[in-house]
Image: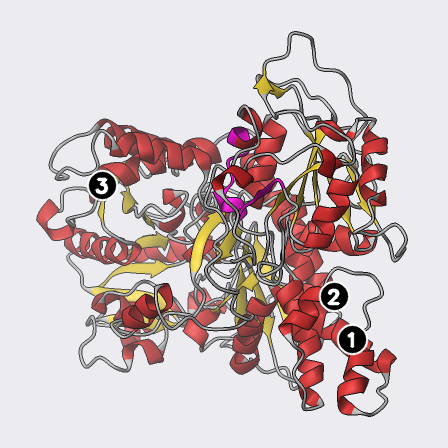
Amino acid sequence: MYVNEPWGDQEWRARSGSAMMGHQAPRLRATTPDTPATPAPAATDPGGESHGRAAVRRSTEVCVKDVDAIFFDFDGTLWDPEAEIFRAHAEVFGEFGHRLPVDTWSSLVGTIGCDLWTQLEQVTGCTVDRAELQERVRRRQQELLGGLCGRPGVHRVLAAVDTLGISRGIVSNSTREWVTRYARQCGLAEGWSTVQCADGDRASAKPEPNLYVAALASLGIPAERAVAFEDSPSGVRAAKRAGIRCVAVPNSMTAALDLHEADLCFASFEHIDLSDIIGGESMEQTGPAVSTAAPAPPPGAVAGTGAGADVATALQHYYYLPDKLRAVGGEGVHLYAEDGRRYVDCSSGTFNLSLGYAHPEIVEVVREQAGRLIHVTSKFQTEPLNALVAKLAEVSPANLTRVHLKSASGSDANESAVKIAQVHTGKSDVVTLFRGHLGQTLGMIGASGAAFRRAPFPSHLPGVVHVPDPHCLRCFYRQERATCGLLCVERINDFIDYASTGRVACVVLEPISGNGGNVVPPDGYLQALKDLCEERGIVLVFDEIQTGFGRTGRMFAADHFGVSPHMMTFGKGLGGAGMPVAGILTEERLTGVEGHHINSTFGGNVLAAAAALKTLEVIGRPGFLENVRDVGAYVLDRLRDLAGKVTFVREVRGVGLMIGIDIVDRDGRPDPALTNHLAERGLDHGLLLRTSLYGHGNVLKVRPALIITRQEADEMCDLLERLFLSVS
């Protein structure tokens, strides 16, 4: 980002006095107050609702003596919609064969009553239907802004404001409705002590100081005790006219403009250390200054050198190309991309981020463990592994008393479980379900229930028998559940008698299919299946790699259905925030297989064990699993309500936060093409979505991190509704 005018080092320091309309700007200094914090007015969110939050001075360990409030401009500062708004208008200009100059836009952006359609009429020489064009821009704008989030670093800076006990407010030329809507989308709706909006009143809008004057009055503080963050010259000028010190943080559309009136200027919120800025002896530059080397490139320009060239080089060497989205960070249920967009991750990574991105307790325990011991051969004991083994035995079904933690992945765990069953039964065959997904090794690809996965490979695991899954919506036997007598279990006897060697070692299945369409078995199915296995001396293995550790609102799906298998595999969510860990729980009778048959190099990793132990602690806290059940039921209700508004949703099914949306065509048949289209369009709406059967299926999988709140669930469902209605 760039400014037109170079500033010397001394000019980065506080420039106060006459420029502040007679107000002498005091130095911003952090001190511990000698007197108790004074009560403040109740805070108000952008919607105008009071929620009783202490505002002007909150009691904290560290307070700031000379700053009582920090004000933030909204559009362009807290979030950056301007490039997308420009794009919506530029597309209209392009339809008329003309380009909307960036400098024209930059000079008008943020002003009330700016008239681009007059300019369009001037360059085209014809009259345009302004109302129709404005409506088209509005719709396109809504679509483009759907996935946008707060600017990188904003959440961290706001958290620092709260930690320092300083009141914060929004001062915006936009309407209150606009601010309310997009503050919620960006996760910025909470914690504001005052919100001042122009609401279309040109007389009160920036660069006039009136909004800032009103903000000061609402909090009852003088101008010299406030600081403003702005992105544009008009915003900076408004703050300075009100006598408020100002920090400029330009965005892609305003970086080339003259911001010399600001007291400080930073290229990004990521460069800002708030405690240094307001905690030092003066307002000093503490991060990289805005470069003055050249004007900013226009929106959408692709760099040909530097980082862009490095990426291009890297992409040439990928075995297969990754998605174009370049992730730079994550927090909770949100993933942040390099371009500043924030996405609600409906898939919690690959269903392995049970506690979301960068869970602070996982980060801390991993950091601490890494400083002591990252890995040791699994031949030896370590404190984290011993503790994890004991904890897993404690939380698992009572009959599963032995823990094998030396698997490197879920696929590895499933393959090892088959080996254990084969050794102990002396039999060879494996029964699995249609649409089942058991892993990526050659053996587990062969055992999985989809032909397209086996097709490229000439050799498969011998002795695998695939049987129909309990998919009541599309019953293989064309039965109705009320009268079927669980034929899908009973007929497995026929498959064993006529399609196998008669020597079946185990039945391996996911209690709820993960990649196969989120199929939830009918009541009684799993118990009937266990009864069949015990009658025939077959080991029943539950693959709980996706369903385990709280996904269903219980520790395991086995707990939800009240059926304990003879063996259980686990992985994914146990790592909490992405640490790789997998293993097997077995009954006592199934021990004794030699380690060299079922151990992997990175199995039993100490770092992953420390993360897993913390994950189990968090999941086991009072109210955690109850929240998964409550939020999951709420999401199911909202999605079922949404299904009634479109024609392409056949069913929404799930348990806890393991939910699937069944997508069909006009004739009610599975529609993988539309399912994939929805997932792709989801990116435009701020959603990360995955589909069943690697794009061959017709189910959108909704499995966010288990720490999702009701407010975040509303955000996710709002975005899904916007996506579905736009496609409908």
Distance in Å between CA atoms under marks 1 and 2: 9 Å
Do the residues under discs 1 and 2 have CB atoms within 8 angstroms? yes
Q: In the image, residue 481 lies at what x, y percent?
A: 59, 66
Please name which of the two marks, 2 or 3, marks the residue nearer to the observer.
Answer: 2
The earlier-in-sequence mark between 2 and 3 is 2
Q: Is residue 251 magenta?
A: no
Disc 2 marks a residue whose amino acid type is Leu
Q: Residue at x 78, y 60 (%)?
A: 111
Q: In the image, residue 433 lies at what x, y percent?
A: 38, 68
The earlier-in-sequence mark between 1 and 2 is 2
Seen from the viewer's position, the closer of residues 616 and 679 is: 679
Seen from the viewer's position, the closer of residues 536 and 480 is: 480
Please state if 40 lies on the left or on the right of 493 as rendered.
right
Question: Residue 108 has which mark?
Answer: 2
Distance in Å between CA atoms under marks 1 and 3: 61 Å
Please state if 127 lies on the left or on the right of 689 as rendered.
right
Secondary element at image label 1: helix
Name the residue carrying label 3: 605
Binning the other alpha carbons within 10 Å of mark 1 as few (below 14), some (14 to 19) or many (20 upward) gives some
Name the residue carrying label 1: 116
Q: Is 265 rendered above or below residue 414?
A: above
Binning the other alpha carbons within 10 Å of mark 2 as few (below 14), some (14 to 19) or many (20 upward) gives some
> Can you tell which quarter of the image residue 660 is in?
bottom right
Seen from the viewer's position, the closer of residues 116 and 8 is: 8
Disc 1 marks a residue whose amino acid type is Leu
Q: In the image, residue 567 lies at what x, y percent?
A: 31, 48
Disc 3 marks a residue whose amino acid type is Asn
Q: Is 621 rendered above or below residue 175?
A: above
> Can you tell which quarter of the image residue 500 is in?
bottom left
Q: Is 61 rendered above or below residue 673?
A: above
